[in-house]
Image (cartoon, rainbow, N blue to C red):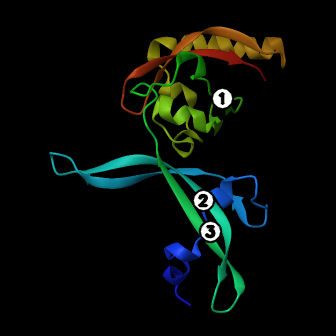
Amino acid sequence: SVFYSFTTRYRLPSWSMCTGAESSRSDCMQEKSFFCRISGGKKCEGDLQYYPFRMTPYLMKVQDKVHSEDQFCCLLLAEKVHSGYEAPRIPSDKRIFTTTHTPSCVFQDVDERAVPLLGYFPQDLIGTPVLLLMHPDDRPVMLAIHKKILQYAGQPFDHSSIRFCTRNGGYVIVDTSWSS
């Protein structure tokens, strides 16, 4: 069989079947989303322009009317990621994300809520030293934070703001809370 023969409009289940109350776990399963950049034309200078997207795969059952069998189909929902600072803006009280780091200050995990605020995808930051993305004048603050983490031994604490380099080269001020 040919893939596109199962994707003609009349054979795909309605989107509400996948997102509504009547959907069963076996009819449509959302998988973990990921991020990628997709080219979308050329800039004035002739270089390709890439746009960030959040990709969410869904594994769906569709019925082949010829053979009356359920077939699995992968539906990939692509959502363009917009900057959290452009209209519609993310309200300042909703600009919250979490990251985890190794004891040597290397990113281990990055919350996907950071993407519209920092411009980096989680995979861009994981494995990168935190200090490389911190404003040079704030690096001594990081040393003080590191000492305090050891001192507080697992208890969370707030610390002063630090400047963090975004993907476009600018800096944003990040209020931080730390624990070990």
At 56% from the left and 10% from the top, the residue drawn is 161
Q: SS for tag 1?
A: loop
Q: Which residue is mark 3?
A: 13
Identify the amino acid type marked 2: Trp
Q: Judge whether 157 appears above or below 74 on screen.
A: above
Estimate how packed mark 1 is, as few (under 14), some (14 to 19) or many (20 or more) residues with alpha carbons within 10 Å. Answer: few
Label 3 to label 1, Cα distance in Å? 36 Å
At 25% from the left and 54% from the top, the residue drawn is 41
Q: Which mark is residue 54?
A: none
Label 2 to label 1, Cα distance in Å? 31 Å
Q: Which mark is residue 98?
A: 1
Percent position (x, y) of residue 180? 78, 23
Q: Given contact means CB atoms under 8 Å apart, are the residues at marks 2 and 3 in contact?
A: yes
Identify the amino acid type marked 3: Pro
Indicate left or right for 158 with 10 as reference.
right
Q: Judge whether 25 appears above or below 123 on screen.
A: below
Indicate left or right for 151 with 81 as reference.
right
- Say which label, 3 or 1, has the lower sequence index: 3
